[in-house]
Image (cartoon, grey):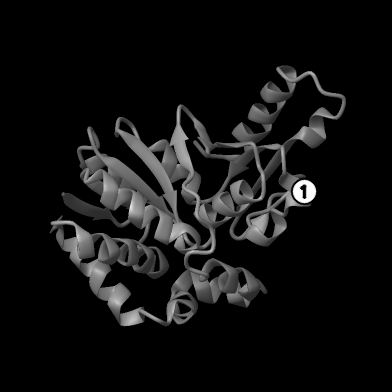
Amino acid sequence: MHIDVTLYPSELKRVDQKGKTIVVVDVLRGSSTIIHALAHGCKEIYPVPDVKTAWQKRKALNLTITHNQKNKYVLIGGERNGFKVKGFDLGNSPQEYTAEKIAGKILVFTTTNCTNTLKLCKNPTEVLICAFLNANAVSKYLASKKRDIIFALSGRNDTYSTEDMICAGMVINEISKSCKVLLSDTAISAKIIYKYYKGHILKGLLDSFHGQYLKKIGMEDDIILCAKAGKFDIIPRYSNGLISLY
């Protein structure tokens, strides 16, 4: 089993994705929010790359739905620079995605980094969404499949993010316990940085550049939630422009 790590979205263009599992990681906060939404009953999520497309997608979905509260059935969520987009129903704080708000609903979702990573997943065997919240479930699944893996880190504005690297390293470390693996240099680095923060995941998130930024704008509670490894036993999958549990 060969395991590679791409450090930011544009790096996905350099790798051969065919026949591999891509694991998209955006700990702070895109993938954490996706996991939280689906764990609390969200029906399905349509990730889109920008705000304009988000509004267009919501309008298109409403045209196909026969429901007496269309705008409350198809929600629109996401952020730019960490803040909820003006006019959106929800932002990118996983805490917002409660069962009361999201259960049974469709979500159109756009973020600065995570949704752009997803659009660069072109022809892999499958695409999984991972964060600390479901890292244990993802580790077990990947070990059982024994397929070559690419951890696609979302980073921040197409640069490297420490928190995503720690998360990838955690999963790689678990897979390595039961499978024979061949690690790329970036995968080795992820494993090393995870071991440095092992037992201190929250510290790793707070040490990261984006963690410091979120704390500065008053979102430290989100960081604390995103550090809860193994909170959910679910694995969101992305296929044909849609994220769901199956």
Q: Is residue 101 above or below residue 46?
A: below
Q: Could you tell me which residue is drawn at 54 percent across and 66 percent down?
A: 226
Q: Is residue 28 left or right of residue 164?
A: right
Answer few, some or many: residues within 10 Å of disc 1's Cα (few below 14, many 20 plus, some between 14 and 19). some
Q: Which residue is mark 1?
A: 101
Number of numbered labels in the structure image: 1
- Residue 109 x %, y %: 61, 42
Q: In the rendered image, which quarter is residue 177 located in?
A: bottom left
Tell which of 120 and 99 is nearer to you. Answer: 99
Q: Determine whether 188 is above or below 236 in the image.
A: below
Q: Give residue 180's quadrant in the image.
A: bottom left
Farthest right residue in view: 68
Q: Secondary structure at mark 1?
A: helix
Q: Position of residue 120 (x, y in %)?
A: 37, 38
Residue 156, can we see it? Answer: no
**Residue 175 falls in image quadrant:** bottom left
The answer to whether 196 is drawn above or below residue 14 in the figure is below
Q: Is residue 44 left or right of residue 140?
A: right
Left or right: where 104 falls relative to 181? right
Nearer to us in this view, 48 or 175: 175
The amino acid beneath tag 1 is: Lys
- Please state which of residues 201 and 209 is positioned toward the viewer in this rendering: 201
**In x, y percent, where is residue 113?**
48, 51
Left of 71 or right of it: where is 59? Answer: left
On the image, the x and y values in percent for residue 116 come to 45, 43
Residue 129 shows up from this direction: yes
In this rendering, is residue 214 above or below 82? below
